[in-house]
Amino acid sequence: DTAVSQTPKYLVTQMGNDKSIKCEQNLGHDTMYWYKQDSKKFLKIMFSYNNKELIINETVPNRFSPKSPDKAHLNLHINSLELGDSAVYFCASSPAGTSGYNEQFFGPGTRLTVL
Amino acid sequence: DAKTTQPTSMDCAEGRAANLPCNHSTISGNEYVYWYRQIHSQGPQYIIHGLKNNETNEMASLIITEDRKSSTLILPHATLRDTAVYYCIVRMYSSASKIIFGSGTRLSIRP
């Protein structure tokens, strides 16, 4: 299936640990994103990469480090996890913005719980 | 902050048209109106977008007022599967342009 996929779907971990969330899209898109949805259901953009280059960084703590090994993958690594990092993290992708409409396709989300 | 204002919640009878309003009085000339929805526990799903003309696709219709300060998303024949939070967003036509989600409208479809 053509889609945006994320692994794992659920992640439960202790405070202070380091964890990674992986995202892959097979839609041939150039741009990928990470969003955080907190307990109040507000969805906020964290990062955006276009062809492996960072184009949006929304004042996210530097404990969060996105890594794009190629344009089909955008992984999110989180160091020293804190209780406030508990949220659902969504990955998304979109075609190149200058050549067409900019619909974003979202993955199923990763529910991170920090204990 | 989101540049749109939507009602917190609405309900609609199954089979009827659901009309979801959105105010975006500060929209600028190069900003589009986008609609997404989020069904419980899933990722947001794109519905439709427009600049100034009314738009229709297989999912919905988008009616934008002439002054572009408000719009209405129309689901012509709502089903129970349309129960979701609907987000109205204004943004520029660029991948570098952020999607800023507001609190959206929680639409409930009653049988």
Image (spheres, coloured by chain):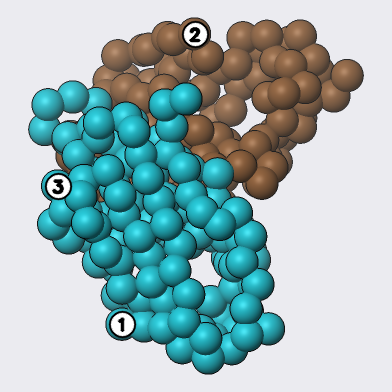
Chain colours: A cyan, B brown
Marks 2/1: CA–CA distance: 42 Å
The residue under label 1 is A62
Could you tell me which secondary element the residue under label 2 belongs to?
loop
Could you tell me which secondary element the residue under label 1 belongs to?
loop
Q: Position of residue B70 (x, y in %)?
A: 42, 31
Q: Between residues B32 and B25, which one lies in front from this camera angle?
A: B32
Looking at the rendered structure, the kind of residue marked 1 is Asn
For the point 17% across and 35% down, the residue is A97
Residue B58 is tagged as 2
For the point 30% across and 61% down, the residue is A47
Q: Quadrant of residue B1?
A: bottom left
Give a yes or no on whether discs 2 and 1 share a subunit: no
Q: Between residues A54 and B35, which one lies in front from this camera angle?
A: A54
Work out whether residue A5 can be spotted. Answer: yes
The residue under label 3 is A51
Q: Position of residue A78 (x, y in %)?
A: 42, 76
Q: Are marks 1 and 3 in contact (CB under 8 Å)?
A: no
Give a yes or no on whether discs 1 and 3 share a subunit: yes
Left or right: A17, with B51 as reference point: right
Q: Position of residue A62 (x, y in %)?
A: 31, 82
Looking at the rendered structure, the kind of residue marked 3 is Asn
